[in-house]
Amino acid sequence: MTPGFCALLTCVLDPKPWHGDGAAQLMKMARITPKSYLCPRVKEKPDVSSGNVFSPAWEHAPWTDDFVDIQGEDSGVPPPRHSTRMKLMWDDDALYVGAWMEEPQVVATIKERNSVIFQDNDFELFLNPDGSNHQYYEFEVNALNTVWELRLDKPYMHGGSEHSERVGMRGQGNLRNLESGILVDGAVNDPGAVSKGWGVTARFPFADLIAQGHCKSPPRQGDVWRINSSRVQWRWEWRVEEGKGSWQKIEPEKGEDNWVWSPQGLVNMHVPDMWGFLRFEPAYAAPLPTSPAEEACWPARKSLLCARFLMPDYMAGNGGKLPADLQELGVQLEDGFESGVVARDNLPGGYEVWVKTPTGQSTSVRGDGLIFPTSVFQ
């Protein structure tokens, strides 16, 4: 059975009187295990200003799977209309990301940097190097190479806020030496053109990620980061009114499509627990359905994910009482795992939930979703 799947599934399939919104959201995530990508080192530095992920510098990097709907392949939602794939590489200085998006009608309307780019069709990247769920980076870009960068102090569901120049925080969110480029096979904003698609390449310097508080040091071979990528896709049409033409969204009230590398289960990219695993490799290696890095840490993290979503339900239904451990929440732990819940008045939510593996590794989560080394045994 997929590591950690049992813990998540059991706690929501056995209904409890106190189950609420948290349990309902967990049900949507229960069938999903985050994907893994084994990231090779750069052999030849790519020209990221070109937007060309098909250049020789990228040949040795494996493609990801085609992106799927954010809710997952078996969610009942129609599959993406157009293919999206991504490649990643790294060297001592930066992470390199390249993507290709099939698109017969390439539309982009936003030209001002650090605007809300997902109001256009876009490509997005999310990075959480330390896997803490906090202080993560988001990058969005459209086919005009208009970029929005931001840092999230924590997920929006836990009261998180955007730190970026868009909201007047000068120097916040932006990677000083970020580079990106766009390649369009066809034309942008031409209602008479039938295009093949558009690509993006980008370079994310580790020194800038450190300076913005996303990580403390560059990655080393074998390190694992949490990462995901999204493509936001609206339906557009060219309308001529009073002799003037413009691109308009078709039925925008129905919302956009969200196609992602590693499905979230929820229509919400801001659940970093569900992002994929990126492992830094020495050279080319084909991506596997599950990597050793994932198998080592995912069972414990998935148990803590259960706690994060079920604790508010449990406390609301039991007069603010804390459960003794995860089993009281209905979470079935992996063999040899232990868990507990400790009241912590000084922590958000007033508690710390910990999980200890058979090898003695201990990890905790608190009420605002922060994953951190367990303090109970220290």
Image (cartoon, rainbow, N blue to C red):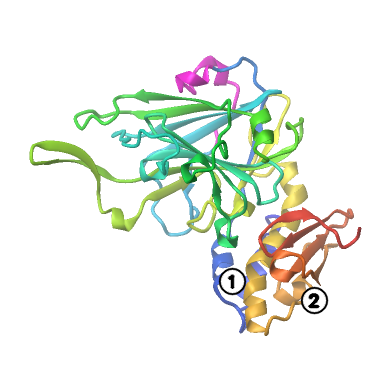
- Percent position (x, y) of residue 21? 54, 72
Residue at left offset 87%, top offset 57%: 358
Residue on which disc 2 sits: 324
Side (left or right) of 163 relative to 211: left
Outermost residue, left direction?
A: 242
214 relative to 123 in the view: left or right? right
Q: In which quarter of the image is the C terminus?
A: bottom right
The majority secondary structure of the magenta stretch comes to loop
Q: Is residue 51 magenta?
A: yes
Q: Does the magenta stretch include residue 347?
A: no
Residue occupying image coordinates x 89% and y 55%: 360
* Label 2: how many Cα within 10 Å (few below 14, some 14–19, many 20+): some
Q: In this view, does 190 lie above or below 12?
A: above
141 with respect to 378 (left or right): left
Quarter of the picture containing the N terminus is bottom right
Query: Which residue lies at the image location 58% right of the left edge and 32% below the top edge?
Result: 175
Q: Are marks 1 and 2 in contact (CB under 8 Å)?
A: no
Within-10-Å neighbours for mark 1: few <14, some 14–19, many 20+: many
Task: Kindly identify which numbered label has been placed on residue 334.
Answer: none
| Amino acid, disc 2 | Ala
Observer-nearest of 224 and 367: 367
| Secondary structure found at label 1 | helix
The spot of residue 10 in percent (x, y) is 66, 70
Q: Quadrant of residue 279?
A: top right
Q: Give the range drawn in magenta.
A: 47-64
